[in-house]
Image (tube, grey):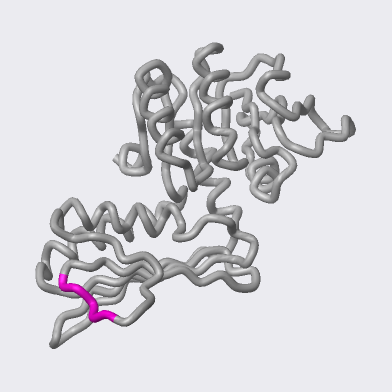
Amino acid sequence: MRILLSGYLGEMGRHVISCAKDNQKIVAGVSLGVTGNEAVPCFESFDEVNVDCDIIIDFSHHSVTIPLLNYAIKKNIPVVLATTGQTDEEKQAIKDAAEKIPVFYAANYSVGIAVLIKLAKQAAAAFPDADIEIVEAHHNRKIDAPSGTALAIGNAILEVRPDAKFDLGRAGNRKREKNDIGINSIRMGNVVGIHEVYISTNSQTLTLKHEAHSRALFADGALAAADFLLGKPAGLYGMEDMLK
């Protein structure tokens, strides 16, 4: 498998390079700050890319989503999007692209998070009157809040709580409304990623928690997604599809 790595010079790009298996070869990169001394051909934008590859893995910035997808559609290349924080326009571009090429898109590439999301949805259905709160913590360099993973957990819960609504970063002078799903963000130090879900009634509280110990976890997941995506027809795929 020949991989074009978007975000080649970033921290996650380095993890993808180090985690790639023998059959997964990084043949080129796209990244800001290219010096010309990189181990493979690197480009600062998709307008400059001129290489043959089998798949694109993206660990860059959500602003790259549309030019990346335009390039992938033009070249008919599958894409693993491992970047979060997309705008509504960018999310629509992902859906549109998936009608033409295979696109794997997940808020989090951890198998543990995929299990957490499934359990959170089951718990919300089992306790229909419970208060639900989501707390996520990440390193102090993370730009988007709440995290894409926290929103993915919340959206899964909305499937069984269609009348609920998000309360992002609760503040002000008002009582908690019954159908609130509180989502709060913490940014500190070098925390890789912690997600907690609280399902609480007047008599009991169920707490679900996932903690990532290394960012290599997400690189491993993205590479596994790349293996999964090769040979698939056009469509939008996620962690649940891969786990099946």
Residue found at the far front of this picture: 173
Residue at 13% from the left image edge and 87% from the top image edge = 203
Residue 140 % position (x, y): 63, 67
Is residue 229 or residue 144 the one in the foreground?
Answer: 144
Residue 177 % position (x, y): 19, 73
Residue found at the far bottom of this picture: 203
Residue at 44% from the left image edge and 60% from the top image edge = 146
Residue at 71% from the left image edge and 25% from the top image edge = 27
Compared across the picture, whether 4 is left or right of 171 comes to right
Compared across the picture, whether 189 is left or right of 138 comes to right
Quarter residue 112 falls in? bottom left
Residue at 66% from the left image edge and 48% from the top image edge = 15
In the picture, the quarter occupied by the C terminus is: top left
Q: What stretch is highlighted in magenta?
A: 174-178
Compared across the picture, whether 235 is left or right of 228 comes to left
Residue 86 % position (x, y): 47, 42
Residue 135 % position (x, y): 40, 71
In the picture, the quarter occupied by the N terminus is: top right
Figure check: 176 above or below 77: below
Quarter residue 75 falls in? top right
Compared across the picture, whether 213 is left or right of 49 comes to left
The tally of labels here is 0
Is residue 140 or residue 113 the one in the foreground?
Answer: 140
Figure check: 124 above or below 149: below
Figure check: 115 above or below 200: above
Q: Main secondary structure of the magenta part?
A: loop
Residue 177: say if magenta. yes
Is residue 78 or residue 202 the one in the foreground?
Answer: 202
Residue 166: say if magenta. no
